[in-house]
Amino acid sequence: MKENLEGDPSDDASANFLKNSVLYKEFLAEREEILKHKWIESEKAGSDIGFEKALLDWIVKHRSNWRERRMRENRAGKTPA
């Protein structure tokens, strides 16, 4: 089987589509919030709590309010932080 060393141009198109995808941007924003939560909770605990624990804790405590706030900001034409 011969490998294409130059790369597949459709890979670039797929990567650009992904980067411009609203869903992907939301994923990145949510991931950033989870990582912030992980840092804060790890500081409180005095050690790294791990991503999975931070993820579950953030989902239970903060996700719905975070999503509502982002939707309000999007409707108002603001760029969500």
Image (cartoon, rainbow, N blue to C red):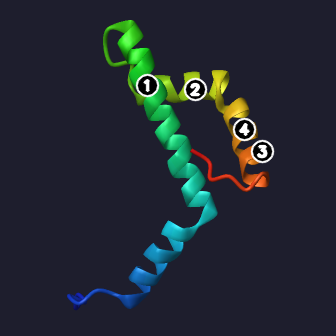
Mark 4 vs mark 1: which is more N-terminal?
1
Q: In this view, does 21 lie to the left or right of 68?
A: left
Say which of 6 and 27 sits in front.
Answer: 27
Q: Are marks 2 and 1 in contact (CB under 8 Å)?
A: yes
Please report the residue visible at 38 percent of the width from the left and 89 percent of the height from the top.
Answer: 9
- Dot 3 corresponds to which residue? 72
Any part of residue 43 in sight: yes
Q: Do the residues labelled 3 and 4 touch (CB within 8 Å)?
A: yes
In three-dimensional space, the C-alpha distance between marks 2 and 1, rounded to whole angstroms, equals 8 Å
Q: Where is residue 41 in the image (x, y as percent from the top left)?
A: 44, 16
Disc 3 marks which amino acid? Arg
Q: Do the residues labelled 1 and 3 touch (CB within 8 Å)?
A: no
- Check residue 58 in the rendering and tell me which mark sits there, or answer none: 2
- Dot 1 corresponds to which residue? 38
Q: Position of residue 28 (x, y in %)?
A: 50, 50
Placement of 37 over or under 69, stated as above or below: above
In three-dimensional space, the C-alpha distance between marks 2 and 4, rounded to whole angstroms, equals 15 Å
Disc 2 marks which amino acid? Trp
In what element is the residue under mark 2? helix
- Dot 4 corresponds to which residue? 69
Q: How crowded is mark 4: few (under 14 residues within 10 Å), some or many (20 or more)?
A: few
- The quarter of the image holding the C terminus is top right
In three-dimensional space, the C-alpha distance between marks 2 and 3, rounded to whole angstroms, equals 20 Å
Disc 4 marks which amino acid? Arg
